[in-house]
């Protein structure tokens, strides 16, 4: 069983990496990019039957810092 | 007086901090490896040093904050031991929940490595008792993730309770309200991005950091 964890900075938290990517895109001549926010994708290969509660706890306890980040769990 | 410095894989200011502790206390601190689950009994002072613990994987300080030794540090802090986290140590303390907020990537995106002007905001704390309130001092910084972030409510609370110990005299890394160092609620845990341990000897070019360690020792002696 696999789970994909998407970790993104909360709205209002400055994202210098996203800004740098934005500038680089503009430098390449891509217009019309209003904003860029960069995040992380963490793929977990889990034992079958791992509970949703456990996956959520993994996110809260380590994978995301909920002071500054949101997370979304996608199971496949 | 018993002190200790925690050493993580990737710590690189641990020996400088040990020298600062030894200079101030007259006794060599215990160097504690991150896998240790227990600290020596009755530690008075614990240093969480700068560096790049665990290669800054996931987030700066995230891995170190979950290492076995940090639970022992939290316990020691709980019973009143002084805990000083510098640079990566500050990141570890926020990640472990001993201090509020988080340290984000510097606003300009650049690693900042230079001396910075600081203002002492709270000269009443155990860590700052040898400074004057409003005093201008200078410590070096060397960090990529020093941009202090907390929600407005937390920031107001920190300010209201006198828990902002040091402030940058000008914007260095985008830190909220130019915060450079904060205290926990009980006042026995301090996290700071600047490096006082790098300015304790005339040979360092400046000695502004020395009083931080001397003040701590003075406080501990008075407490004993």
Image: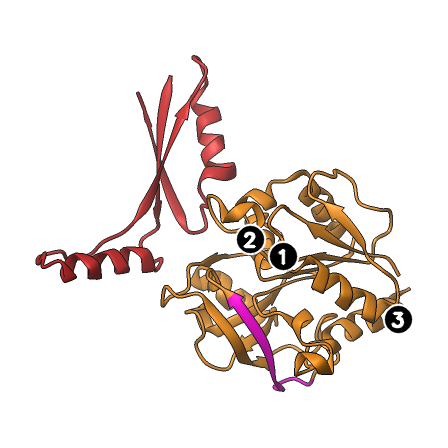
Label 3, label 1: how many angstroms apart (C-alpha)? 32 Å
Task: Report the side of B185 relative to B168 (left or right).
Answer: right
Q: Is residue A55 above or below residue B160?
A: above
Q: Are marks 3 and 1 on the same chain?
A: yes
Is residue B91 left or right of B200 when viewed as pictured?
left
Q: Are marks 1 and 2 on the same chain?
A: yes
Q: Is residue B114 left or right of residue A43?
A: right
CB within 8 Å, label 1 to label 2 = yes
**Residue B129 on image: x %, y %:** 74, 77
Q: Residues within 10 Å of mark 2 (few under 14, many from 20)?
A: many
Give the mark nearer the N terminus: 3 vs 2: 2
Chain letter for the orange part: B
Camera-near label (3 vs 2) is 2
Q: Which mark is residue B12?
A: 1
Image height of A48 relative to B85, above or below: above
Residue A15 visible to the viewer = no
Label for residue B52? 2
Image position, residue B116 (x, y; %):
53, 79
Q: Residue furthest right?
A: B224
Count residues near mark 3 (Cα–Cα under 10 Å), then give few for <14, some for 14-19, many for 20+. few
| Contact? badges 3 and 1 (CB < 8 Å) | no
Depicted A50 relative to depicted B172: above or below: above
Q: Which residues are magenta?
A: B132-142
């Amino acid at each position: 069983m696999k789970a994909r964890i998407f970790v993104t900075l909360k709205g209002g938290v400055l994202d210098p990496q996203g800004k740098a990517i934005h500038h680089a895109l503009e430098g390449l001549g891509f217009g019309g990019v209003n904003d860029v926010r960069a995040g992380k994708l963490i793929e977990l290969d889990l034992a079958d039957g791992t509970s949703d509660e456990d996956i959520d706890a993994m996110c809260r306890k380590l994978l995301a810092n909920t002071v500054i980040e949101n997370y979304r769990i996608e199971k496949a | 007086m018993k002190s200790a410095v925690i050493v993580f894989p990737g710590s690189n200011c641990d020996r400088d901090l040990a020298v600062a502790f030894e200079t101030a206390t007259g006794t060599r601190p215990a160097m504690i490896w991150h896998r240790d689950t227990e600290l020596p009994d009755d530690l008075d002072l614990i240093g969480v040093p700068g560096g790049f613990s665990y290669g800054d994987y996931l987030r700066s300080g995230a891995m170190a904050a979950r290492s076995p030794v940090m639970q022992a540090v939290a316990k020691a802090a709980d019973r009143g031991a002084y805990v000083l986290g510098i640079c990566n140590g500050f990141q570890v303390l926020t990640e472990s929940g001993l201090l509020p907020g988080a340290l984000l990537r510097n606003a300009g995106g650049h690693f900042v490595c230079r001396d910075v002007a600081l203002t002492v905001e709270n000269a009443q704390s155990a860590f700052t008792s040898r400074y004057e309130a409003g005093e201008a001092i200078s410590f070096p910084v060397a960090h990529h993730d020093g941009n202090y972030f907390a929600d407005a409510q937390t920031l107001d609370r920190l300010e209201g309770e006198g828990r902002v110990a040091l402030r940058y005299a000008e914007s260095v890394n985008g830190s909220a309200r130019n915060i450079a160092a904060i205290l926990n609620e009980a006042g026995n845990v301090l996290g700071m991005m600047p490096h006082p341990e790098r300015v304790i000897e005339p040979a360092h070019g400046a000695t502004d950091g020395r009083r931080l360690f001397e003040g701590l020792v003075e406080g501990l002696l008075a407490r004993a």
